Structures are given as structure tokens and as C-alpha cells.
Image: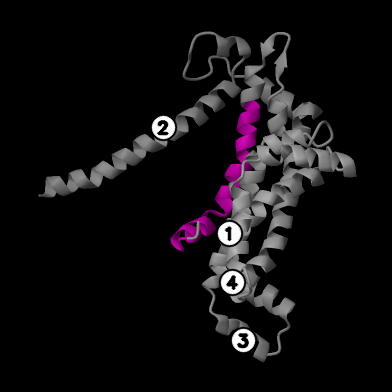
Amino acid sequence: MAAARDGRGWGPAIVMTIYLLFLLVPIYWLVNMSFKTNAEITGAVSLWPMNPTLDNYRVILTDPSWYMGYVNSLTYVVMNTVISLAVALPAAYAFSRYRFLGDRHLFFWLLTNRMAPPAVFALPFFQLYSAVGLFDTHVAVALAHCLFNVPLAVWILEGFMSGVPREIDETAYVDGYSFPRFFVRIFMPLIASGIGVAAFFCFMFSWVELLLSRTLTSVNAKPIAATMTRTVSASGLDWGVLAAAGVLTIVPGALVIWFVRNYIAKGFGLGRV
């Protein structure tokens, strides 16, 4: 019986270890390639760099065409996250606290925008932004991503807000709180985990999205994802620099996950994520 219990205890641990190793192998191989020269990468397969070099990272950190890609990406991603949350918070509060004609249909319609692929909206956005002079700007990409992130943020935040008793709103009004003061000082701290989860998903979608960000930018606001697709030279692909860029691209997402990890866990626990 003890052996059987031990077997059942080790089984999930072994499966989880194999699963984590399976996920980490591509990341390790990417880091491994980032410290190699192109000759070593295209030569014999090796599990670690035979002659480690930092030249690939030096190229990215000293070449404006590379490091400005990260600056551009972070700029419009942060803008999109702030705009999406600023719009989604009052909208989610309205859906969670009030009932009006067509509220459920409107809520579902918001989610249908999230279901559509970005390619559907690439051409309309391109023509619209070209006409109004927003093409190749950070604002263009940030606003385009709002079409997908705002519905997702509203859906997540509405679930968290519905879990807050309505009596808290009524008590605050009785105590003389204005709505803005109540919302910022009392209500938002109560749904801080929901705001963290919504911000995480908005950040991650905007950070990894390529089609719209590449279509709506050219030079001034070109993101790192678009830069990474244009590494072909006369000598072929620059594998080492491309691998180093991939490693640096993972870092912001990993940092965001680290800072909001507790909020994400609460979101899964509440069954809304």
C-alpha cells in the first residue's frame, strides 16, 4: 500500500517534470544560439557554445535599427494597456451594476470582436490611418489593439466586479463619497487582482501581435517583431543576432508575468480567466 501511494505521489511529479523540460528546451536552445557565431550555429550541433560570444547582443544594443524596435514596441504596448484599462473599467462597472436594454447582447458583441482574427481589420485600419495621418505612429498600433483588448478586459473585469457586493457601493454613497472618489479609493483596490489580470492579458496580446503592428508601421514606429522578420542579408540569415533578439523579446513578458503572478493565480481561482 505504501509503495502504491508512493507511486501515485511520484507519477504527477514525473509528468510535470517532463512537461516543463519539453517547454524549456526551445528557450534553452534559443539562449544557446544567442551566444554562438553563425558559423558555429550552421555547423555541427552542440548543446552549449564552444566559443561563447556577446557580439550578437552587442549588435542589438548598439544598432538603432534594433534597439529602437524594443522602444517602439514598449511604447505602444504601454499606451494600449493604459487606454484599454481606462475604457474597460467604467464599461465593466456598468455591465456588472446596471441592467439596460440589450446589455447581454452588447456584452456578447464586444466578445465577438475578440474572436475575429487581426487580418480582418488590417486593411480597414491601414486605409483609415493613412487618411487621417496616423500611419507609422505608436498611437495607430495602440488604438488598433484596443479593438481586441478592450472586450477582453471588460469581460475579465466584469467578473471581478460582480463578485463585489453591491452593499459596498450603497454604503459609500451614504457616507458621502462621490462616484469618482468611491471608484478610485474603495472599489478599485477591491478588484486590484482583476485589474492586474486584465493588464497582463492586454500587455501580452499587444506585445506578441505582429500582423497589425507590421501593417500599420513602416520606420518611425516599427516594432521589434517586424524587425526580426527582416534579418536577411546578402550572406543569408544572421542566426546569432536573431536568437539574441528573441531572448531579449522574451524578457519583458517574463517580467510582467513575475510581477502579476499572484493576480493571475487569483483570476484562475475565481474562474474568470
Magenta-span inclusion, residue 269: yes
3 or 4: mark nearer the eye: 4
Q: Residue 170 carries which label?
A: 3
> What residue sits right under mark 2 in the picture?
22
Give the class, few, some or many, for how many residues have Cα within 10 Å of label 3's Cα (few <14, many ≥20): few
| Majority SS type along the magenta span | helix
Q: What residue type is labelled 1?
A: Phe
N-term-proximal mark, 1 vs 2: 2
- Front residue of 114 and 154: 114
Q: Where is residue 164 in the image (x, y as percent from the top left)?
A: 54, 75
> What residue sits right under mark 4 in the picture?
96
- Front residue of 61 and 233: 233
Looking at the rendered structure, the secondary structure element under dot 2 is: helix
Q: Is residue 184 left or right of residue 34?
A: right
Looking at the rendered structure, the secondary structure element under dot 4 is: helix
Q: Where is residue 208 in the image (x, y as percent from the top left)?
A: 63, 39
Q: Position of residue 119 (x, y in %)?
A: 67, 37
Q: In which quarter of the image is residue 161?
A: bottom right
Magenta region, residue range: 244-271
Give the class, few, some or many, for how many residues have Cα within 10 Å of label 1's Cα (few <14, many ≥20): few
